Image: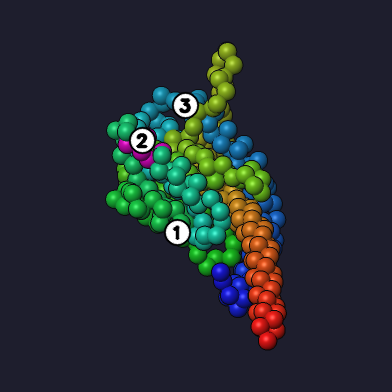
Amino acid sequence: MASLKALRTRINSVKSTRKITQAMKMVAAAKLRRAQAQAEAARPYAERMQRMLASLGASVAGNPDAPRLLVGTGADKVHLLVVVTADRGLAGPFNTNVGRFARNRIRALEAEGKTVKILSVGRKGAAYLKREFPSRFVGEITFAGKKRIGFEEAQDITARISAMFEAGEFDVCALVYNRFRNVISQTPVEQRLIPAPLPEVAPAEGPAPIYEYEPSEEEILAQILPQNLAIQVYRALLDSAAGEQGSRMTAMDNATRNAGDMINKLTLNYNRTRQANITRELIEIISGAEAL
């Protein structure tokens, strides 16, 4: 049985831990409100842009002069996965879920005979996947130390992806990240960037839509296609940031509750031990008095 001093020390230690988890929960809640507002504000524009380019890609499918960022290279051999995770831990299963999802996806692609390359955004994803796929990594990007992720960071990632694509280093590119649903729900998803995904709903019967460009098709697509990539990456970064804070807040809330339960159990154990010591001392005193 532990001594009273050891129990008091452990109780004080758990109380200190509970104060830390409570503070981290409050910080995560404050960051979550801002991150959630940003993610929800960016989502409608990104989704509409994706649908528009998907429809445009379907209309020019088979055209040899169509932009490669829109229709791809025509091959499906080399896949680039851009895995977005957090730079910090203590966020529950947030990073592990994305890492496990990416790992399963990599295994499935390689089982089909594909070559997979990994571009990691966030230190936790790199640490998770490097244990099994160190040779697949082509780069790591981290935002550690940045208080806020802006559109510039998304443009930097997009520029790197575009440079690799122009160099012929991959045929298909997809984002893997946690899509923010609510505070307690973040779902790992895969979103294809290159080529643009085809529309999910089959087009209505009849003639295909005709697109008119002003000033010219080349000028518009040359600007809008890289911009769409940056928008989709930016949306993934915002969703990931919101999901990270939501998962961290939930994890710290659970840790605070568990610390409270442990304090109650330790306090009960302390009181029982103290009462046993008092009872034993009384018995010793009474036995001594009876012996005299």
Q: Secondary structure at mark 2?
A: helix
Name the foreground residue: 32 vs 14: 14
Residue type pointed to by label 2: Leu
Name the foreground residue: 136 vs 139: 136
The crowding category of the residue bearing disc 1, from other C-alpha atoms within 10 Å (few below 14, some 14 to 19, many at least 20), is many
Contact (Cβ within 8 Å) of mark 2 with mark 1: no
Residue where numbered disc 2 is placed: 109
The label shown at residue 123 is: 1
Residue at image position (60%, 38%) is 47
Residue at image position (60%, 78%) is 5
Residue type pointed to by label 3: Val
Q: Which residues are magenta?
A: 105-110
Q: Is residue 99 above or below residue 75?
A: below
Q: Is residue 16 above or below residue 32?
A: below
Name the foreground residue: 50 vs 224: 50
Q: Quadrant of residue 215?
A: top right
The crowding category of the residue bearing disc 3, from other C-alpha atoms within 10 Å (few below 14, some 14 to 19, many at least 20), is some
